[in-house]
Amino acid sequence: MKEDLKQYTLPGLRDRMIGEQLDGYRGEQIFKWIWQKNARDFDSMTNISKDLRAAFAAKFTISCMTIDHTVQGKDQTKKFRFRLKDDLCIETVYIPEEKRHTICVSTQIGCPLNCSFCATGLMGYKRNLAAHEIADQVRTIQELVDQKVTNVVFMGMGEPFLNTKNVLDAIDTLCSPMGLGISQRHITVSTIGIVPGMKQLLDTRYKVKLAVSLNFPNQDQREKMMPGTRQFPLREVLEIANHYSQRKSMVTFEYVLIKSLNDSIQHARALLDLVKGIPSKINIIAYNAHPHLPFEPPGEHVIVRFHDFLLDSPHTITLRRSRGPDVCAACGQLII
């Protein structure tokens, strides 16, 4: 079986070429062809000799994702279903705006966390995505929509920090000037609060943004609704979040409002008490209902009341409107 060169990071591809008794810069050439010029084979690599291209083609391959299905929402948000080489599928979302072109990437096929209000958890967990499968979601959609991607959010299927190494390698490809050239400041990694992964990101050279899905300001309720948080007390999560805000960039706390569960003024007050002293942004978003789940968003007046109560705090407060809910492309709605 031929070896897939897309699986390598830039340093890895340099080393692989050295292993072939070639100069390391050959790896840089191939990497640029794959990630910047969307090369699917070696014939198109015109700055490499014909004989060397033939030698590469005999030994190596360049994998490509297969588009299984595409659907577009009323707000122009597009959801793509990709079929991978093992015949499993993932969903990825493209969100166009006037000056921003954002892609919401998946990091796992399914999710093992089983959050009660998230449709992806209904799939169970299949496997982690490889680094190139994560980055290739961005490269492929950028080619399809013919727009330079400005922002990437790791908020699709799966928990990024249960696949930390591949997520970090994907970030390397996304940010590399020889890769997709996306600014680190325009990349956000979202987690329910997997402390080891948060620490690992904190200790890297990357200055990407970090978002923590709090959703419930009470540890017991949070553990009940988000079972994957049981081994990570809020105290530890918030401590790392504070370090991240101090050392890298201001952390965002995501808070999904679910009718009658976490939408009262008492919840808002508890939320502010919880994050007191942490330089942070609080991002409020109404729950995106799914036909397979029993939860609902609060009424508009409840959402506004909750949001307005937070405005007197020292935190930056935003109320995010969902994109693509009519095609189940919004947060918590991705499922195969």
Image (spheres, rainbow, N blue to C red):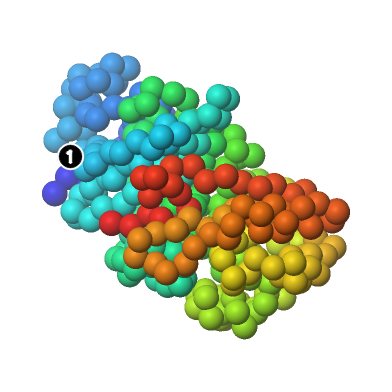
Disc 1 crowd, CA 10 A, few/some/many (<14, 14-19, 20+): few
Residue at 41% over, 55% down: 333
In the picture shown, does residue 128 fall above or below 184?
below
Residue 295 picture location, percent across and down: 47, 67
Whether residue 12 appears in this view of the structure is: no
In the image, 310: left or right of 292?
Answer: right
Residue at 82% over, 65% down: 276
In the image, 308: left or right of 92?
Answer: right
In the picture shown, does residue 333 fall above or below 323?
below
What's under tag 1, amino acid-wise? Lys
Q: Secondary structure at mark 1?
A: helix
Where does label 1 land, which residue? Answer: 59
In the picture shown, does residue 116 fall above or below 166?
below
Residue 163 picture location, percent across and down: 45, 61
Residue 182, quarter of the rendered image: top right
* Viewer-proximal residue among 33 and 84: 84
Residue 24 picture location, percent across and down: 41, 34
User: The C terminus lies in which quarter of the figure?
Assistant: bottom left
Residue 58, quarter of the rendered image: top left
Whether residue 291 appears in this view of the structure is: yes
